[in-house]
Image (spheres, rainbow, N blue to C red):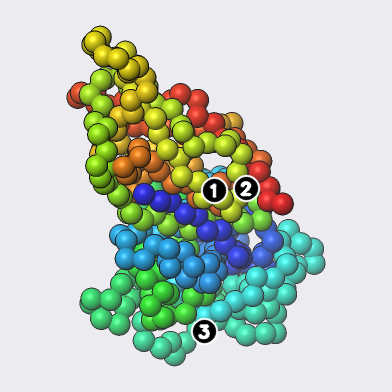
Amino acid sequence: MAVYKLFPIKDATLYSDVPNTNTGLDQIIEISNRNTSGGNSVTPYVSRFLTQFDQIQINDLFSTIGTSTWQANLRCFIANASGVAMSTTIYANPLAQDWNNGTGTYSDSPATTDGVSWKWRTGYSGSTWITSSWTANITGSFPSSNAGGGSWYYTSSNSTAPNPQTTQSFNTTTSTKDLNINVTDAVKLWNSGSISNYGLIIRLDPTIEFNPSQSTEPIFKYFSVDTHTIYPPCLEVKWDDFYWNTGSSTQTLITSSHPYISLAENPGIYYPDSVNIFRLNVRPKYPDRIYQTSSEYVNNFYLPTESYYAVKDLDTNEYVINFDTIYTKINADSTSNYFKIFMNGLEPERYYKILIKTTVDGSTLVIDNNYYFKVINGK
């Protein structure tokens, strides 16, 4: 099982109220609908954000994945959310046009205009977003008085092709407002060459955008790739390369409800480009009393096939790789159980902890034996 994370090469927010302003270096990316009162009227303003991942990195990754079953999710981590109604839906679509990141922030005075904005794709007086005469499967959305806001693929050329548009919904009781949206079909379209990879546009439900109701003002602020925190956005790709072949090994499945597990392969320090195979030593914590001429502690056992790993950030106690019944299953070969971790998706200069989840003798166990490691900055 494998989990791999790619980080954006650029991201920016488009604000309809400042149609020429670039925000390519803001630490926050935002989607929102805000209403401003003026006299007897209310004017709604909308924000959407763009993000793009390097297609060369994606191609390299899929040369490793091969024909395995896989899934790609865009993950963005919430900085602040407000005004979320009982049901608020967020849309993700592949962009239909290229764009320049720029060097601005929302608060720049005078405004920076050297990159993408609500009106411009390539900076002020450069190229604008398409706002009419779209080709097949491409559209945009904006008020007639303020054209712009991106253009995107909203449907496929036929019913059997991947669907470029995907959604995620939130409500007032959702415990987290983090974005974890399945963009597998968009990545499939990029990989097949059906559309060019210009990145993704993230926006609110069209029924919410430009809604003048004072009760419809959801605001989602996420950390951008330029954040100084440990929460940049990422494209999380998971694939199923589960392997279970113990060959001629005489080791047996453990049946004790009190297994002892240790890591056989853990140097403790890794560089971000490391890929480490962690092997497990498994034995009963309290072995049965039997007469034999060798120590029971030198015999290794296998965990059941329904066994999984997870990785937590030691300081925040948050899962950076959570237990997954498909994508974090623990493998086995003739030597032992094992699993693989790609260190590229973990923030450097931080400590992490590995946990094991398994079901033995009818009991589901989560084993935390303080298996720590650290990712350090590369040479």
Question: Where, by quadrant of the figure, is residue 161 drawn?
Answer: bottom left
Mark 2 secondary-structure assignment: loop
- Return the disc, 2 or 1, that comes first in the chain's sequence: 2
| Disc 3 residue crowd, few under 14, some 14–19, many 20+, Cα 10 Å | many
Of labels 2 and 3, the one closer to you: 2
- Residue 130, labelled with which disc? 3
Q: Which amino acid, mark 2?
A: Tyr
- Give above or below for 300 relative to 198: above
Q: Which amino acid, mark 1?
A: Met
The residue drawn where x is 70% and y is 84% is 125
- Give above or below for 222 relative to 191: above
Tell me whether circle 2 and circle 1 mark residues in contact (CB < 8 Å): yes
| Disc 2 residue crowd, few under 14, some 14–19, many 20+, Cα 10 Å | some
| Residue at mark 2 | 271
Q: Is residue 298 left or right of residue 34?
A: left
Give the CA separation, mark 2 to mark 3: 43 Å
